[in-house]
Amino acid sequence: MATNRALKGRIRSINNTRKITRTMELVATSKLKRAQDRVTAARPFAQALTEVIADLATPDLASQFPLLRTPAKPRDGGPAAAVVILITSNRGLAGGFNSNLIKEARRRIDVLTAEGYHVDLIGVGKKGIGFFRYIGRKFRSERTDIGDRPTPDHAASVVDDLTKDFAEGRIGVVDLVQSKFISVLNSPPTTVRVLPIAAPAKARGGMRPDYILSPDAATLLDALLPLYVRNTMYRGLVETVAAEQAARRTAMKNATDNAGDLLEALKRTYNRQRQAQITQEIAELVGGAAAQQG
């Protein structure tokens, strides 16, 4: 059984740890609010961009743009290279957030490899980069400078070269492994196809608006498709940051609560031992006094 001094040391240590986890919980809560605001702000633009492309991209027109064409598989003479972009965090202490994203990336790499692709990996965030370095996998490129405040320029710097390589036929597939931020308690890892751009729903049929366009639809699509790719990457960044902060807040809240429970248990143990010690000392005093009187 631990001595009273050892118990007091553990109580002091756990109390200090609880202060740290509580502070980290509060910081994550503050960052989560800003991250949620970025997610909310990004969605209307993405929705409007998707609708415009859906209205413009007729099947005949879509065939003119490489970003909308699905290349043949490697076995059928298509490009042999594929790219997986993995977004993780630069910091840990977020529960299973990073490990779940890494598992999804490994699963996606296995699927593309089975289809005959040679898969290049782009790492965004230290945790994912560190894991794949540990297992000996090389990266096409690594980014640890984006942090928890991504911008459209960050997204463009990641995907612009990939867009060019895809358009020129050097890459057959670009997939993005990210967290899909549904709510604070629900942010599952998911894979989003960045390239080729999936044909929007309105381009497959249904009523089409009667627009008078200037410039023409082809010129507009030529400008909008690269923007759509950048916006897909940007949304992946902001949603993953929001999911990271939500996961860290939950993990730190659980750690704070567990530290509190452990403190209560240790205090009860300390008080019982202290009480037993005092009772023993009183019994020894009474016994000594009785012996002197007898």
Image (cartoon, rainbow, N blue to C red):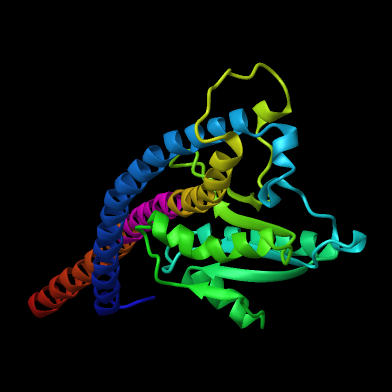
Quadrant in the picture for the C terminus = bottom left
Question: Is any part of residue 99 visible from this angle?
Answer: no
Q: How many marks?
A: 0
Asked if residue 58 is positioned above or below residue 240 in the image, the reply reads above
- The reply to whether the magenta stretch includes residue 255 is yes
What x and y, as percent, mark residue 60? Answer: 75, 35
Corner quadrant of residue 64: top right
Q: Is residue 142 left or right of residue 148?
A: right
Asked if residue 255 is positioned above or below residue 221 in the image, the reply reads below
Q: Nearer the viewer, residue 285 or 129?
A: 129
- The reply to whether the magenta stretch includes residue 23 is no
What x and y, as percent, mark residue 245? Answer: 39, 53
Q: Nearer the viewer, residue 42 or 27?
A: 42
What x and y, as percent, mark residue 285? Answer: 13, 74
What x and y, as percent, mark residue 30? Answer: 27, 50
Q: Name, please, the residue furthest toward the right.
A: 76
**At x 57% / y 66%, what residue is drawn?**
161
**At x 79% / y 64%, what residue is drawn?**
79
The magenta-colored residue range is 241-263
Quadrant in the picture for the N terminus = bottom left
Q: Is residue 262 left or right of residue 172?
A: left
Question: Is any part of residue 183 visible from this angle?
Answer: yes
Q: Is residue 20 left or right of residue 142?
A: left
**At x 70% / y 40%, what residue is drawn?**
62
What secondary structure is the magenta-colored segment mainly?
helix
**At x 47% / y 42%, what residue is drawn?**
185
